[in-house]
Amino acid sequence: MISEPRRHCTVELQALPSRIGQVRRIVSAHLRYWHLDALIDHAALGVTELLTNVHRHAQPDKTCTVEIELMLERLTVSVHDNDPRIPDFGGTPGSRNAMTADQFATSGRGLAIIEAVSESWGIRPHGERGKVVWFTLPAPAPAVALPSRLHSVYGATTDGPFAGLGCLGAAAGTSLDGIPFGTPTEPLPTPVAARSALTG
């Protein structure tokens, strides 16, 4: 189930390897849609690590919910699972250099990676059972919108992408040259002429 208010997305899933890749693509697609392309790599890596931890360690089941939310120029990514146990990470959540994982280890480094790529992170209990692991990323300032420009269609006196182009089926009226809107400036080719032009 996916619910999507304008800057919020929630995905419920079983944290299985086949589903983790799908959720990573969903998160990436939402960030692209929100024009937050610069955050895709870190957010996708972070959500992958959190879901991998659920897959490896959560009990009694692998059901979880991934939530991404953009608010006040900050992206928050969180994963809620049904296991109330807080992982042993060797330090205070969110404190830099709190992780004690071996730098050459091939597993057990999920929270160290979260700490490395995020602005802040933490773990909190969720009700009577379960927990939420979350991290934040600073959102870049939105791109400055270009001022909109109006362009004439026929007989345009300004430059622009539609200068001199017609629109078939346009509303009644005439251009500056007295040509009715919607009238092609050159005769349309017959199907035979069009086919021969296409074939060379």
Image: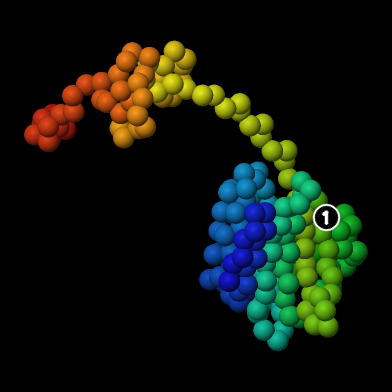
- Label 1 crowding class (10 Å Cα cut-off): few <14, some 14-19, many 20+? some
* Quarter placement of the N terminus: bottom right
Residue 36 screen position, x and y as percent = 65, 45
Residue placed under numbered mark 1 in the picture = 120
Residue 84 screen position, x and y as percent = 80, 80
Please tell me whether mark 1 sits on a helix, a strand or a loop. strand
Q: Residue furthest left?
A: 192
Residue 155 screen position, x and y as percent = 37, 16
At x 64%, y 54%, the residue is 6
Residue closer to the observer: 177 or 149: 177
| Quarter of image, res 162 | top left
Residue closer to the observer: 112 or 190: 190
At x 37%, y 32%, the residue is 171
Residue 138 screen position, x and y as percent = 77, 47
Residue closer to the observer: 58 or 150: 150
Residue 72 seen: yes
At x 79%, y 48%, the residue is 72
Note whether 182 is above or below 100 in the view shown. above
Note whether 32 is above or below 163 in the view shown. below
| Quarter of image, res 35 | top right
Side of 63 relative to 135 (left or right): left
Side of 58 relative to 156 (left or right): right
Q: Residue furthest bottom?
A: 60
Residue 102 seen: no
The kind of residue tagged 1 is Ser
